[in-house]
Image (cartoon, coloured by chain):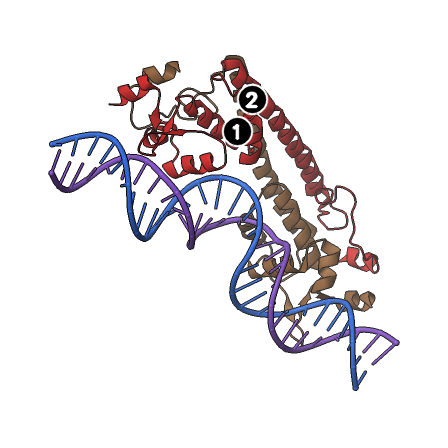
Chain colours: A red, B brown, C purple, D blue
Amino acid sequence: MSDKKLIDANLAVGFVAKRSGVKVSTLHFYESKGLIRSWRNNGNQRRYKPDVLRRIAVIKAAQTMGITLEDIKQTLGTLPEQRTPTKQDWAALSKVWQTQLDERIQYMQRLRERVNGCIGCGCLSMAKCPIYNKDDYLGEEHSGAVLLERE
Amino acid sequence: MSDKKLIDANLAVGFVAKRSGVKVSTLHFYESKGLIRSWRNNGNQRRYKPDVLRRIAVIKAAQTMGITLEDIKQTLGTLPEQRTPTKQDWAALSKVWQTQLDERIQYMQRLRERVNGCIGCGCLSMAKCPIYNKDDYLGEEHSGAVLLERE
DNA sequence: GTAAAACCTCAAGCTAACTTTAGGTCAACA
DNA sequence: TGTTGACCTAAAGTTAGCTTGAGGTTTTAC
């Protein structure tokens, strides 16, 4: 029964999959990437500690924020290895990602303003568009640029 | 000379590549995806109209906004086929993408607020976290949920 | 005890957006 | 005229984040 599983605090992969809403194959995959851990029973089957569920929730939440698995792995790496992470530990992670999210939002807003400018001027060209040309970059060969600009 | 190329208004692929800052292979790729067009000269080499440069700039700008090539293709499809697109035509595209960008920003901001809440409560769990649980979803199997929640 | 359900590994497949490679043709210039 | 450099096609490779499939073992349930 699942009650037994819970009391023993070692969860089978199928149970974790159902609970977390991710597929078994995804759990295998996350493990292969070092995002989650498990140990094996006598029959070589994976067993998980219950806090893997929180870990998966956090992974999914971070992904929703646009963080890559690699970055998530890095940040998860700051969690304590020995003890089960506390609320504070998890909260620290949220803070890291919130900062990244903030940056992303600000970037998008700057972009938005530029697009705004472009709606007015219709300037979208390789040479002048502020959206594309962060650094006023022009191709290596400048000859004939004036003619092109006129197009 | 490149001046000749410009006056003739048929640009070779290498020239377009240099000017737009994308690789020749990318131009081939975009063409295969129907994002840009070219015709061939006698020797089977690609030739482009100068406005391909603006088109590429727009593609790149849209990508910066997080729009997929497929969506970009759709939106570019609203440009007039017969005549060279005008400022107004291009401006209409910016407007479409600006709207999408707006939505994206709002989504991120809502996310940010939720993460904010989570920093306070440290609640990041599969069952309760507002970041992950848009619809208060729990796995299919509910037995033992209370025990798990306590973890 | 046996059959179905769950689990295992390893390899290959998938999508997006390209890049790289290989083998060959065309164009520009001295 | 010859030799670079630019161009051509088609196919395979790349990264992220998984999923699917094949073939075999373990657990669970009756």
Image coords of residue B104 (percent x, y) = 56, 34
Question: Relative to A136, does residue B27 appear above or below in the rendering?
Answer: below
The lab-note entry on whether marks 1 and 2 share a chain reads yes
Q: Of helix, strand and loop, which one carries label 2?
A: helix
Q: 10 Å neighbourhood of mark 2: few (<14), some, or many (≥20)?
A: some
Q: Chain of mark 1?
A: A
Q: Quadrant of the N terminus of chain A?
A: top left
Name the residue beneath numbered marker 1: A62
In the picture of the structure, the residue carrying the numbered disc 2 is A93
Label 1 SS: helix
Give residue A142's position: percent from left, percent from top: 83, 56
Amino acid type of disc 1? Ala
- Residue D30 at x, y percent in the picture: 11, 32
Screen quadrant of the C terminus of chain A = bottom right
User: Which is more foreground, mark 1 or mark 2?
Assistant: 2
Q: CA distance from mark 1 to mark 2?
A: 9 Å
Q: Which chain letter goes with mark 2?
A: A
Relative horizontal placement of residue D23, taking residue A63 as reference (left or right): left
Q: Are marks 1 and 2 in contact (CB under 8 Å)?
A: yes
Amino acid at pointer 2: Leu
